[in-house]
C-alpha cells in the first residue's frame, strides 16, 4: 500500500513538473533540444562578449552603453527591415538556415581571424592620437573605435539572442502550439535554456582556468569551437523538427499552398501602433529591457573595478551564470508553470516588474550611498565595493531568473491567439525592436547623463537612474493588466472557433 502511495505521489509530481500528454513526447523533446542548443550558444557568447570588451586596454563598462544605444539599435532596425523583406521572398525554414549560418560565419571570423590578429587590424595608434588630441574627452567613443573587433563580436552576440532565440525559435514554437498547450509546457521549454546556462557556467570557468596563464584568445577559441558544433546541431535538429511536427502542429494540409505574408516593416510598425494589444506587449518588452539594462550598466562598472583582469572578470561572471541557471531552472520547473495554471496569466506576468523594480531600487540606493554618503564609506571601508558587487550579482541572478521563468513565458503566450501576420511580423517588430529599444533607451539615458554632467563614470548618477527605474517598472506593471484583459477575450474567441 505504501509503495502504491509513493508511486502515485511521484506520478502526481511528475505531471506537475512535466505536464506532457501522450503523443506529445516526441514533439516536446525536439523543441526542448532545439531550445537547449540555441540557448547554449547564446550563453557562451554572452559570457565572452562583456569580458573581451570591458577588460580590454583603455576600456570600461560604460562603453557597453555606447554600443547598445548607438550601434546595436540602428543595426536592429536594419535587421528587421531585412528580415521582413526576406520573409516575403523565402520560406521561414530558409530564413532559419541562412540566419544561423550567417551568424556562425561571423563568430568564426572573430575567433580565428580577427581576435588573434588584433594588433594588426585594430587602430591603436590612431586611437591614442585621438585621445591625446581631444584631451580625454569622448573617451568611450574612442574606445569603441579602438576595439572595433570586440564591438563586432558584442553586436553579433546580442543579435543572436534576439534573432535566433527570441524571433526564429519562438516564432516556430508559437506556430506549432496553442494557448492551452503553452500553459502546460512552455515552462519546460524555458527550463531548457536554464540547463544550458548551468552547463555553460562551469564550462567557461574550466577553460578560463585552463588558459589562465596564457593569452585569453585561447579560451575564446576553445569556446567558439563548442559554438560551431552546436550551430551544426541546431540546423539538423530544426530540419528534423520541422519535418516531423510542423505540418501537424499548424493543421495545414500538405496540398494547401503556404500562406503568403507581404507586410513590410513600416506596415508592421503601423500594425503594432494600431493594435492596442500589441502596443501593450511592446510596453512590457521595452520596459523589461530598460529595467534590467539600466541596473546592469552601473553594476558592471563596479565589477570592472573589483575584477580588472580578464581571467578574474570571466571567472566571476561564469559562477554567476551557473547560479542564475540553477535558480531559473528550479523556478521554471517547480513554480512558474504551476503559478500560471493556478493564479492565471496576469499574476504570473506581474512578478517580474515587482521583483526587478524592488531589487533594482535597493541596488541604486546602495550605489547612491557609496558616492553621496562619505560617512557610510568610512564606516564600511573598502568592503562597500564588494557588498555592492555581490548585491548587484544577486539582483542580476534574480532579474534574469525571473525574466526567463516568468516574463519570457507569459510574453510568448500572449502572441499565440493572434493572426499569422501579427505572430510573424508584429512579433518581429515588438520583440526585436522593442527589446532593443528598451536596452537602447536605458543606454541613451546613461549616455546623456554622462555627457551632460561631463563624467566618465556612471556610478555617481544612481539617484537619477533610480527615478527612471521606478517610472519604468510602474508602466510595465500597468501594461500587464491591460494585456491580460485582451488575452482572455482572444483566448475565448479561439476556443469558440475550435
Image: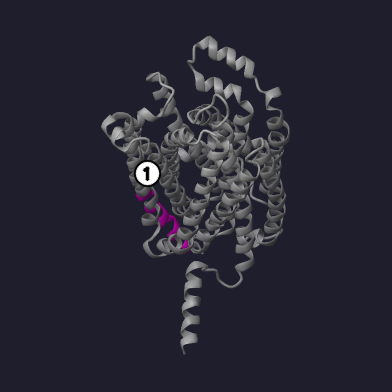
| Residue 15 in the image: above or below residue 335 | below
Which of the 4 quarters of the picture holds residue 342?
bottom left
Please tell me whether residue 494 belongs to the stretch shown in magenta.
Answer: yes
Report whether 163 appears left or right of 274. right
Label 1 sits on a secondary structure element that is helix
Which of the 4 quarters of the picture holds residue 458?
top left
Q: Specify the principal SS of the magenta part.
A: helix
Residue lying at 37% horizontally and 20% vertically, measured from the top left: 453
Residue 21, horizontal then vertical, whole percent: 55, 71
Residue 156, horizontal then vertical, whole percent: 62, 36
Give the extent of the magenta segment.
479-496
Residue 90 in sight from this viewpoint? no
| Residue 17 in the image: above or below residue 416 | below
Residue 127, horizontal then vertical, whole percent: 59, 17
Residue 278, horizontal then vertical, whole percent: 45, 44
The local crowd at label 1, few if under 14, some if 14 to 19, many if 20 or more residues have their Cα within 10 Å, is many
Amino acid at each position: 500500500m505504501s509503495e502504491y502511495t509513493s508511486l502515485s505521489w511521484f506520478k502526481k509530481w511528475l505531471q506537475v513538473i512535466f505536464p506532457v500528454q501522450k503523443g506529445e513526447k516526441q514533439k516536446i523533446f525536439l523543441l526542448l533540444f532545439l531550445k537547449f542548443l540555441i540557448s547554449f550558444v547564446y550563453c557562451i557568447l554572452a559570457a565572452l562578449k562583456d569580458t573581451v570588451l570591458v577588460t580590454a586596454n583603455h576600456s570600461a563598462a560604460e562603453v557597453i552603453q555606447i554600443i547598445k544605444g548607438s550601434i546595436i539599435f540602428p543595426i536592429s532596425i536594419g535587421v528587421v527591415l531585412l528580415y521582413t523583406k526576406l520573409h516575403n521572398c523565402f520560406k521561414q525554414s530558409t530564413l532559419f538556415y541562412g540566419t544561423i549560418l550567417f551568424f556562425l560565419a561571423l563568430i568564426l571570423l572573430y575567433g580565428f581571424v580577427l581576435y588573434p590578429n588584433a594588433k594588426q587590424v585594430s587602430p591603436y595608434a590612431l586611437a591614442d592620437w585621438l585621445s591625446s588630441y581631444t584631451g580625454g574627452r569622448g573617451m568611450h567613443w574612442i574606445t569603441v573605435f579602438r576595439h572595433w573587433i570586440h564591438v563586432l563580436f558584442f553586436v553579433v552576440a546580442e543579435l543572436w539572442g534576439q534573432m535566433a532565440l527570441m524571433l526564429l525559435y519562438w516564432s516556430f514554437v508559437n506556430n506549432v502550439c496553442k494557448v492551452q498547450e503553452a500553459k502546460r509546457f512552455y515552462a519546460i521549454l524555458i527550463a531548457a535554456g536554464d540547463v544550458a546556462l548551468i552547463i555553460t557556467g562551469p564550462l567557461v570557468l574550466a577553460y578560463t582556468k585552463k588558459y589562465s596563464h596564457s593569452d585569453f584568445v585561447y579560451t575564446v577559441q576553445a569556446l567558439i569551437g563548442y559554438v560551431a558544433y552546436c550551430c551544426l546541431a541546431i540546423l539538423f535538429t530544426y530540419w528534423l523538427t520541422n519535418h516531423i511536427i510542423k505540418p501537424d502542429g499548424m493543421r495545414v494540409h500538405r496540398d494547401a499552398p503556404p500562406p503568403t505574408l507581404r507586410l513590410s516593416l513600416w506596415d508592421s510598425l503601423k500594425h503594432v501602433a494600431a493594435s492596442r494589444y500589441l502596443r501593450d506587449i511592446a510596453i512590457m518588452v521595452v520596459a523589461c529591457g530598460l529595467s534590467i539594462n539600466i541596473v546592469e550598466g552601473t553594476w558592471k562598472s563596479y565589477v570592472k573595478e573589483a575584477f580588472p583582469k580578464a581571467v578574474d572578470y570571466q571567472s566571476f561572471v561564469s559562477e554567476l551564470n551557473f547560479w542564475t541557471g540553477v535558480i531559473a531552472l528550479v523556478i521554471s520547473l517547480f513554480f512558474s508553470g504551476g503559478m500560471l495554471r493556478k493564479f492565471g496569466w496576469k499574476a504570473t506576468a506581474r512578478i517580474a516588474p515587482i521583483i526587478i523594480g524592488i531589487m533594482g531600487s535597493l541596488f541604486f540606493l546602495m550605489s547612491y550611498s557609496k558616492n553621496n554618503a562619505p560617512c557610510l564609506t568610512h564606516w564600511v571601508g573598502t568592503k562597500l565595493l564588494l557588498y555592492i558587487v555581490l548585491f548587484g550579482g544577486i539582483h542580476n541572478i534574480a532579474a534574469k531568473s525571473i525574466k526567463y521563468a516568468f516574463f519570457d513565458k507569459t510574453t510568448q503566450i500572449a502572441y499565440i491567439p493572434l493572426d499569422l501576420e501579427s505572430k510573424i511580423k508584429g512579433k518581429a517588430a515588438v520583440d526585436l525592436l522593442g527589446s532593443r529599444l528598451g536596452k537602447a533607451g536605458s543606454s541613451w539615458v546613461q549616455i546623456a547623463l554622462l555627457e551632460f554632467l561631463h563624467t566618465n563614470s556612471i556610478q555617481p548618477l544612481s539617484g537619477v537612474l533610480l527615478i527612471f527605474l521606478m517610472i519604468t517598472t510602474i508602466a510595465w506593471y500597468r501594461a500587464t493588466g491591460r494585456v491580460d484583459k485582451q488575452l482572455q477575450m482572444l483566448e475565448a474567441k479561439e476556443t469558440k472557433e475550435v
